[in-house]
Amino acid sequence: EIVLTQSPGTLSLSPGERASLSCRASHSVTGNFLAWHQQKPGQAPRLLIYATSSRAPGIPDRFSGSGSGTDFTLTISRLEPEDFAVYYCQQYGNSPWTFGQGTKVEIK
Amino acid sequence: QVQLVQSGAEMRKPGASVKVSCKTSGYVFTSFAITWVRQAPGQRPEYMGWINPDNGNKHSAQNFRGRVTLTTDTSTRTASMELKSLRSDDTAVYFCARVIMGGSSWFIDFWGRGTLVTVSS
């Protein structure tokens, strides 16, 4: 199975700053079928990005995804207070679907 | 609006079974698959399986084969996940999620809030 490794584990930033989250796969992700999900305590996770770079409906354009093969990035151009959360990458191009261990974006 | 409302927290003893339900609304139930993902404390999410409510086709992850049963009830628009022979390391939050069944790939587009299952003697 494909192992996804996210870095850094924690990102300490201030509102208005740019966040760059990395997700590296142990093998090439078929079709670049990689998604990013946001999770806040006590809430349902939320899909942000699918197919590497497509934003889910209703997701602000400050969220963008890029990459291919084994290296993928989620960028938040300017952090808003509601963006402080845990972010997971997930690949769905290969069975079984797998998730990264998460990056926590916290307020500095 | 799309809603996936999961059943409440459960406590079980080792060896027992648990059934978690996921009642959906706001969309055509048979047009999307349902997947189940669990997250143990401090761990990454783990895929368990999916089921297509339209035709009953299903897939279970290797780690859960023989222990997990996925079902749907189209009359109540509800998906369920039963896990048997529970162990302490099955303690986790169990999520249901809606899956878009695209031509070339299937992917999660909407999540439930999760159900905490605690396994302890």
Image: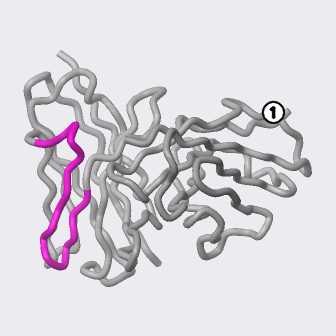
User: Percent position (x, y) of residue A4?
Assistant: 52, 40
Q: Residue at x 34, y 75 (%)?
A: B25
Chain of the residue under label 1: A
User: Percent position (x, y) of residue A20?
Assistant: 78, 46
The magenta region covers: B50-65
Q: Please give left or right for residue A29 compared with residue B9 in the image.
A: right
Residue A104: quadrant of the picture: top right
> Residue tagged by mark 1?
A12
User: Percent position (x, y) of residue B87?
Assistant: 18, 24
Q: Amino acid at mark 1?
A: Ser
Does residue B3 sit above or below A24 in this rendering?
Answer: below
Q: Residue at x 85, y 32 (%)?
A: A108
Q: Residue at x 71, y 31 (%)?
A: A10
Q: How many marks?
A: 1
Does residue B10 sit above or below B58 in this rendering?
Answer: above
Residue at the top extreme?
Answer: B121
Choose between B31 and A80: the one closer to the eye.
B31
Q: Is residue A28 magenta?
A: no
Q: Please give left or right for residue B73 compared with residue A96 in the image.
A: left
Q: Is residue B52 magenta?
A: yes
Choose between A98 and B113: the one closer to the eye.
A98
Q: Residue at x 17, y 29 (%)?
A: B12
